[in-house]
Image (cartoon, grey):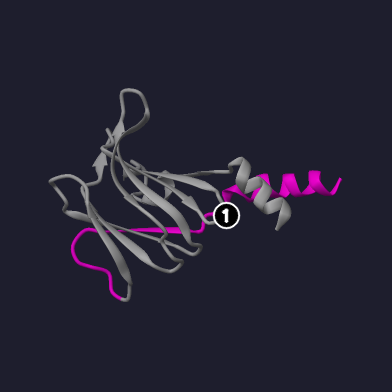
């Protein structure tokens, strides 16, 4: 009964977002510790700042294969990102057909995916964030 209760709690906790995504179009944000900076594409008029409250095991940057709705070529891979640190992605956020995708794994083994593009509703890129549990993350939270 305990394990069943924990599993229900874990599945409800899937909507917990520990990441922060901010878009800056004109100047840099102040008071942010940027540890890595990446440029995706030739037109990089916008900057996306990715920060997490929990450490991230890895972050991968892909070209987005919109014909097959999946990851395309791997462009960059970043190892461990400590909590509170920020990476800056210089890119152009398209409306409609996406060009780039960020995939990552948090310290608790939860996997996340962010499509780098305008969402077409309110301009919040955080709505493009999808997170899901893996078998390791479920075991992690049952034992924790």
For label 1, the residue is 108
When asked about the image quadrant of residue 69, the answer is top left
Residue 93 image point, x, y percent: 25, 46
Q: Residues within 10 Å of mark 1 (few under 14, many from 20)?
A: some
Describe the element under mark 1 as helix, strand or loop. Answer: loop
| Residue 129 in view | no
Q: Residue at horizontal 61%, vertical 48%?
A: 137
Judge from the rendering whether residue 8 lies leftward or rightward of residue 137; answer left or right.
right
Whether residue 15 appears in magenta in the rendering, the answer is yes
When asked about the image quadrant of residue 50, the answer is bottom left
**Residue 67 vertical placement versus 61 (above, below):** above
Residue at the outermost front position: 79
**As rendered, which of 119 and 32 lies closer to the eye?**
32
| Residue 105 in view | yes
**As rendered, which of 101 and 117 lies closer to the eye?**
101
Whether residue 27 appears in magenta in the rendering, the answer is yes
**As rendered, which of 139 and 24 lies closer to the eye?**
139
Question: Which quarter of the rendering shows the N terminus?
Answer: top right
Q: Residue at horizontal 28%, vertical 74%?
A: 30
Write down the region rendered in magenta: 1-30
When asked about the image quadrant of residue 24, the answer is bottom left
Residue at the outermost right position: 1
Residue at the outermost left position: 42
Residue 118 image point, x, y percent: 31, 44
Question: Which quarter of the rendering shows the C terminus?
Answer: bottom right
Residue 40 image point, x, y percent: 21, 47
**As rendered, which of 142 and 99 lies closer to the eye?**
142
């Amino acid at each position: 009964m305990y394990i069943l209760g924990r599993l229900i709690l874990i599945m409800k906790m899937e909507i917990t977002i520990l990441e922060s995504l901010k878009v800056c179009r004109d100047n840099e944000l102040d008071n942010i510790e940027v540890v890595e900076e990446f440029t995706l594409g030739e037109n990089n008029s916008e900057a996306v700042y990715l920060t997490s409250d929990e450490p991230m095991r890895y972050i991968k940057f892909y070209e987005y294969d919109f014909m097959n709705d999946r990851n395309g070529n791997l462009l960059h891979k970043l190892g461990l990102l400590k909590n509170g640190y920020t990476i800056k992605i210089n890119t152009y956020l398209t409306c409609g057909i996406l060009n780039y995708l960020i995939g990552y794994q948090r310290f608790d083994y939860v996997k996340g995916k962010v499509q780098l593009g305008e969402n077409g509703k309110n301009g919040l890129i955080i709505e493009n964030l999808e997170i899901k549990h893996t078998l390791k993350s479920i075991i992690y939270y049952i034992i924790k």
